[in-house]
Image (spheres, grey):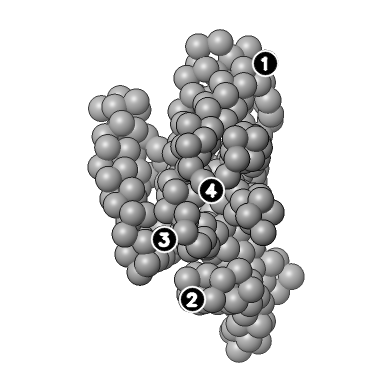
Amino acid sequence: MSNVTSRVLVAACLLPIVLGAVYLGGWWLFALVAVATLISLHEFWLMTRGLAPLAPAGYVGAALALVGAQLSGVDWMVAGALATLALAFLLKAISAAGAAATAGTPATMMGAVWIGCGLGFLLLLRGLPDHGRLALYTVLIAVWAGDTLAYAGGRLLGRHKMAPSTSPGKTWEGFVFGTAATVFVAFVALYKSDFLTIPQSIVLGVVIAVAAPLGDLFESLLKRDAGVKDSGTLLGGHGGMLDRLDAFFFAAPAAYFTILAFIS
């Protein structure tokens, strides 16, 4: 099976599940996000195993962050994630492992915050009053469209590398295609709503178009440090769960705070 065929089949299977969970919201979406978080953390621990992360503390901290986001909003999400630090030091204090705390503890904290809070912002977007469903659909589809068009544009016309040492496949031409697709999706999704104005929807599209590739490049840096091409093989041609979600870890918080600034 070719890489492209694998990507299409995986997307066709997962897309209805994701869109359905977003439509239902509540604990249905929470369950899906929680599963994605656990899988992503597992892949992250494998990538950073040389640093001896304290995985139990990371799992608990990320779970607390998601519960905080679901029940009480951004404040308690951050509080839940910060609990990782205390848990990691506690585990390190009672552990017989000889790895340095100055390496394992930051890696543990990074996993809980980067992944737990990154996906927690998806829950916060869905929880926005009156228009949460529309907001999350817009962000999801805008990121997917931007990623797809960036890939196609880069393959077709890509000549100038964006970050040759970090992610050789990314080009500035692909970024332009992806940006155009992202802004277009945000505009089409929101221009007839009473949620954001047309200029605001375009600004939101630009914010997502910048944040999503940065999230992708950030994970590429981590994979380069770990010496791996993909974070896993769970999703076939898409790689691992982290490979599929990396853009959202930056795009979701950027979109959330942009929308919050507009509707406050």
Labelled disc at residue 171 = none
Which amino acid type is shown beneath numbered disc 2?
Leu
Give the residue at x 62% y 51%: 259
Labelled disc at residue 71 = 2
**Which residue is label 3 attached to?**
33
Label 3 environment density (alpha carbons within 10 Å; few <14, some 14–19, many ≥20): many
Gap in angstroms between the C-alphas marked 3 and 1: 36 Å
Gap in angstroms between the C-alphas marked 4 and 3: 25 Å
Counting residues from the N terminus, which is met first, the one under dot 4 or under dot 3? 3
Q: Where is residue 83 in the image (x, y as percent from the top left)?
A: 62, 79
- Quarter of the figure with the C terminus: bottom right
**Which residue is label 1 attached to?**
160
SS state under label 3: helix
Gap in angstroms between the C-alphas marked 1 and 2: 45 Å
Q: Dots 4 and 3: beta carbons under 8 Å?
A: no
Counting residues from the N terminus, which is met first, the one under dot 2 or under dot 4? 2
Give the residue at x 60% y 76%: 76
Which amino acid type is shown beneath numbered disc 1?
His
Q: Which of 189 and 254 is in front in this view?
A: 189
Gap in angstroms between the C-alphas marked 2 and 4: 23 Å
- Quarter of the figure with the N terminus: top left
**Which residue is label 4 attached to?**
195
Q: Is residue 36 above or below residue 206?
A: below
Residue 260 sits in quarter: bottom right
SS state under label 2: helix
Which amino acid type is shown beneath numbered disc 3?
Val
Gap in angstroms between the C-alphas marked 2 and 3: 14 Å
